[in-house]
Amino acid sequence: MSGHSKFANIKHKKERNDAAKGKIFTVIGREIAVAVKEGGPDPANNSKLRDVIAKAKANNMPNDTIDRGIKKAAGDANAVNYENITYEGYGPSGVAIIVDTLTDNKNRTAANVRSAFTKGGGNVGTPGCVSYMFDKKGQIIIDKEECEMDADELMMLALDAGAEDFSEEEDSFEVITDPEEFSVVREALEKEGIPMMEAAVTMIPQNWVELSDEDAIKKMNRILDLLDEDDDVQATYHNWDE
């Protein structure tokens, strides 16, 4: 069972985010606020909040920062209302791009996302124009160097917990789940002390697009960089095989 691991891309993305910790912490802070508002401040009774906390820890967010975010969201009756809006469009050479945002100002976010696409030679399309090319799945990436468990044991642990697929790549293990089973599988791995480099419900491309033209690569990176810098953008998915 092998798949197309995006471990190298995630590593690159993390390094880029390490240079802008404020960005990723802002993103997670908003997710904490939404999770607390929807399900309450107690992680034991709020699986969405547990998932966000796991994501926070994977990104080295300090525990006191996480706790402050939960308390602030729980105690602030006038907290900002964030709205989830997803944009879909195309980059150079028809690369499919999905942008998940969490915003308190739809007009600002729409303008910024549209500008990012335009500056990179792409364009925003209509809802559904590219999402059919992706599968929504839970994805857990485990760095081999950090994991002490034997590959076969890890695979059985994941599959027994409800995972759909397990693949071993050169430098990582990848666990794929149904979105509904993601929390259960993640918590089973967490209980066994498995260190997770990335754990999130994501959009996985059904096929990939290669860019050989230097100008197209430059433009695609321009789109991704501009979206990465926008605090309203929670996640960007694409089918560019970097």
Image (cartoon, rainbow, N blue to C red):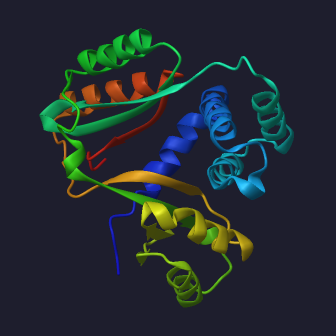
Q: Position of residue 146 (x, y in %)?
A: 66, 68
Q: Position of residue 113 (x, y in %)?
A: 35, 19
Foreground: 158 or 105? Answer: 105
Displayed quadrant of residue 21: top right
Q: Position of residue 25 (x, y in %)?
A: 67, 33
Q: Is residue 121 above or below residue 105?
A: below
Q: Is residue 172 above or below residue 105?
A: below
Report the residue that reaches farthest toward the right. Answer: 64
Q: Position of residue 233 (x, y in %)?
A: 47, 28
Displayed quadrant of residue 20: top right
Q: Is residue 103 above or below residue 162?
A: above
- Residue at point 73%, 43% (across, down): 40
* Side of 160 relative to 177 (left or right): right
Foreground: 170 or 65? Answer: 65
Report the residue that reaches farthest toward the left. Answer: 93
- Residue at point 77%, 43% (across, down): 41
Q: How many marks?
A: 0
* Side of 172 relative to 87 (left or right): right
- Residue at point 43%, 10% (across, down): 108
